[in-house]
Amino acid sequence: MRTQRNIIETVTTNGLCTGCGLCASIAPPGQVAMRMNRSGFVRPVVSQPLSVETSRTISQVCPGLTLAHSADVQNYHPLWGPVESVQTGHAVDTAIRKQASSGGAISALACYLLDSGKVDFIAQIAVDGKDPLANTLQISRSHEDVIRAAGSRYAPSAPLQSLHELLSTGEKFAFVGKPCDVAALRQYARINPAVDTAVKYMLSFMCAGVPSSHGTREVIRKLGAEPKRLVSFRYRGDGWPGMARAVQDDGQSFEMDYNTSWGTILNKHLQFRCKICPDGTGEFADITCADAWYGQDGYPDFAERDGRSLVLARTKAGSELLKTAAHNRAILVEPLETAQIEKMQPYQADRKRVVLGRVIATRLARGIAPRYRRLRLLKASLGTSPVHWLRNCWGTLRRAVVEAQ
């Protein structure tokens, strides 16, 4: 059997890995495992040489190597991707709205999918039951399961490493993941019909990048808590945007506001691939949700309020799901003009406009970069000033040269 040893190593050593875990599920059992590395990111570890066939499949779907919309993609916006509808709203269930991030739209949709029998379970990331700082893939079959998984988890996760096992159940499910996770799954569905048979809906959320586990530990240190004594930790939620909260076994509770935890700590620990990502907005999902921030002068104020979600239907299936969920009072939504998205998510608009320069810089520095197709990056680039674009290009060039991966 012909083998190829270096496809995964090429991705990881060049800082292109997103940590989604799909390669571990594609490879035969025992060949690839996802492990936390010294930098605090989840990465694939290859224990046996991969066949040429396995390597070819991985290279077709790995989001660290390629992101490509299908040739028939519809209603494409240069900044926001495929858009069937744009709305704001929140979960009708007040408990879901309070516990979840933003207005709880994803959790409300997950509960509706279970209640309506459209799926047998939801595959989503939740806090690990044994380690309050770790993430794990949770199979949610009830409202209680969904609420347990509600809220953002700003730490590495590899939800697709168990995809083979999920597909083998013969059940229908919905997948909730980061944009890169969903993109990988969507690309895999094009060459593996079993994915479309089993995965009835793909839900995502807008993502500003994945911080390493070291970022979480820095938050814990600045809170003044003792990591070994923690019985629970959440990044946000229990309000909007909610507080980062650590609770120790002695009952002591420590809190930090979202703007401090994310804005001054966690976002300083992002993996390199996130800095050259063209899809922080979940373009490959059926539905993408995000914080529908209030604010002024083009910048959110992050003040505590009742949660509100930005909800983008991207496919016909996603649009129909939103309509039926709203009709059945799982979620309340109201239309929003597409032009208003940037006021709520200015960071996402800016990163799409400058990412082409960052990718070019990465290829110049490392001789390799992801290939992005049908994402309208050139058109998006025309929406920003040449000076800003070149600054991002130059900054990425310097990081790509000096950062150790």
Image: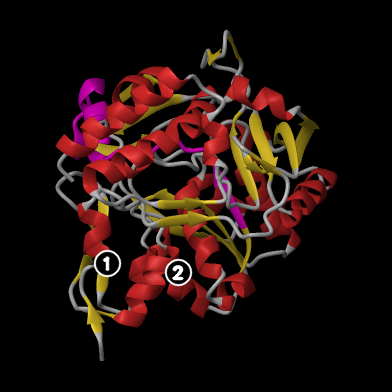
Residue at image x 21%, y 62%?
A: 9
The 10 Å Cα crowd at callout 2, few under 14, some 14 to 19, many 20 or more, is some
Q: Which residue is mark 1?
A: 7
**Which of the two residues, 72 or 12, is positioned nearer the viewer here?**
72
* Image spot of residue 293 (x, y percent): 59, 22
The 10 Å Cα crowd at callout 1, few under 14, some 14 to 19, many 20 or more, is some
Drawn side of residue 236 relative to residue 176, left or right: left
* Image spot of residue 237 (x, y percent): 50, 31
Quarter containing the N terminus: bottom left
Drawn side of residue 77 relative to residue 37, left or right: right
The CA distance from mark 1 to mark 2 is: 20 Å
- Amino acid type assigned to the residue bearing label 1 in the image: Ile
Position above or below: 20 against 255: below
Q: Is residue 178 visible?
A: no
* Image spot of residue 357 (x, y percent): 39, 34
Figure quadrant of residue 89: top right
Which segment did they paint magenta? 202-229
Q: Which residue is mark 2?
A: 163
**Which of the two residues, 189 or 309, is positioned nearer the viewer here?**
189
Q: Quick check: is 219 in the magenta stretch?
A: yes
**Which of the two residues, 395 or 323, is positioned nearer the viewer here?**
395
